[in-house]
Amino acid sequence: MPVLFKGDSELATLSTTFQVDGEPADPTTVMLVVTDPNGEVTTYNSGQLTNPSTGVYSRDVACTIEGLWQYIWVGTGAAVKTQAGTWFVTASELRRLYVPLEELKLSLTSKTDALTGRDPLLLRALTAASRGIDAFCGQRFWRDGTASARSYLTRSRTVQDSGDELLLIDPVATATDLAVEVGTGTSWAPVDGGLFELSPDNALADQRAVTGLLRVAGRWSGSRRVRVTARWGWPTVPDEVVQATLLQATRLYRRKDSPEGVLGSADWGAVRLGRIDPDVKELTEHLRLPGIG
C-alpha cells in the first residue's frame, strides 16, 4: 500500500480496504497501530479513523521524526484482515523521494517480507534514482513547504513572446506566497500582480509547474534583476517521474548484483547494464529543461 503525503504538511495518509469474498465490507472492530522511529506506539481505533465508504479506512499521521515508520491494520469479526507495512521519512520535505519504499518493494517481489533488513539499500537506490532524474531533467519535482527568494539577471533570462517579454524562472509549484520584485540586487521594488501573467497558461490548473512570468505592458529588461519569492518545485510529482523513479531505483538496487555492469540471465546470458534505463529516458525526455546561457 503506497503512503500518500498531503500538501505542504508532513502528513502521511495511511489507507486500506477490508473485503469479504472480494467485496468491500466493514469489520466488527478495526484499528491502526503506528510505530515511529523512536519505538513509540500509537493506536487509532475506529472512532479515530476516517471511513468514507464501506470497507475503506484511512488516517492522517503527522511525521515529525526522520527514520523508519511502521504500521499495521487489524480488522476482526465480519472482515478479518491484518496488513503491515513501513515508510521512511528522510527529510523535512517528504516529497523528495518520488516513490514510497513499499511500492519499490512490491516491484521487486510479491513478498515484501523477503526484503527484510534491506531498507537501507532500497532507500539508497530510491534516493539516487530520484536525484538522478532531477539531474537528467535539470529540475526537481518535489515542492517546498515554505517560500524562498531567488534572483535572476534579466539579460540572460528574458525572451520575446508575441511582442511581450517572458522571464524564464525555475519551476514554481503554487501561486500561494508568490511575490515579484525588480531592482539592482541591493534595492528592490515590488511588481503588482496585475502587471505579469503566469506561463504556461493554465499550468497550475493542469498540475504542471509555472516556468515563466509574462510581463504585461512593460519590460523585465528595464531592470537589471528580478527577485521572485515562491514555493519552488511542482504542484504534484508527474506520473512519468514516479514510474521512471521506480524503474531506475529497481535497476540501481539490482546493480549490487552486477559490480562489473554485467547481469547474468538464464534466458539471455550476460547482459550489460547501461547508466540509465532507456524507458526512464523515454519517460522523462520531454521534462528536460533547455540550458540557459
Image (cartoon, rainbow, N blue to C red):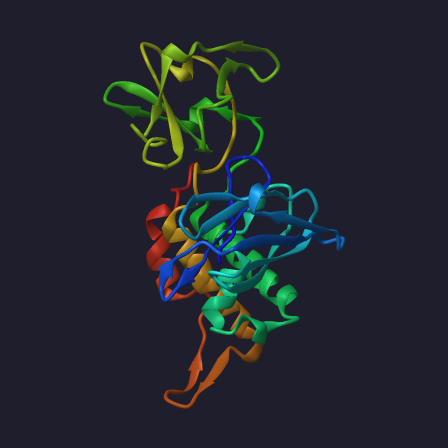
Give 45 or 73, whichever is nearer the viewer: 45
Q: Is residue 274 above or below residue 132?
A: below
* Residue 92 as seen in the image, left or right of residue 219: right
Horizontal and vertical percent position of residue 267: 37, 89
* Residue at the left extreme, as displayed: 162
Q: Answer left or right for 230 relative to 124.
A: left
In the rendered image of this protein, does residue 22 appear above or below residue 164?
Answer: below
Indicate left or right for 247 with 75 as reference.
left
Q: Residue at x 48, y 17 (%)?
A: 180
Image x and y of residue 258, in percent: 54, 79
The x, y position of residue 228, in whole percent, is 50, 22
Q: Is residue 243 visible?
A: yes
Residue 244 lies, in percent from the top left, at: 41, 58
Q: Residue at x 43, y 28 (%)?
A: 156
**Quarter holding the C terminus?**
top left
User: Residue 25 falls in which quadrant of the image?
Assistant: bottom left
The residue positioned 57% from the left and 33% from the top of the image is: 145
Q: Is residue 218 left or right of residue 1?
A: left
The answer to which image quadrant residue 35 occupies is bottom right
User: Where 103 falls versus 10 (above or below)?
Assistant: below
Camera sees residue 12: no
Q: Is residue 132 above or below residue 222?
A: below
Q: Nearer the viewer, residue 115 or 212?
A: 115
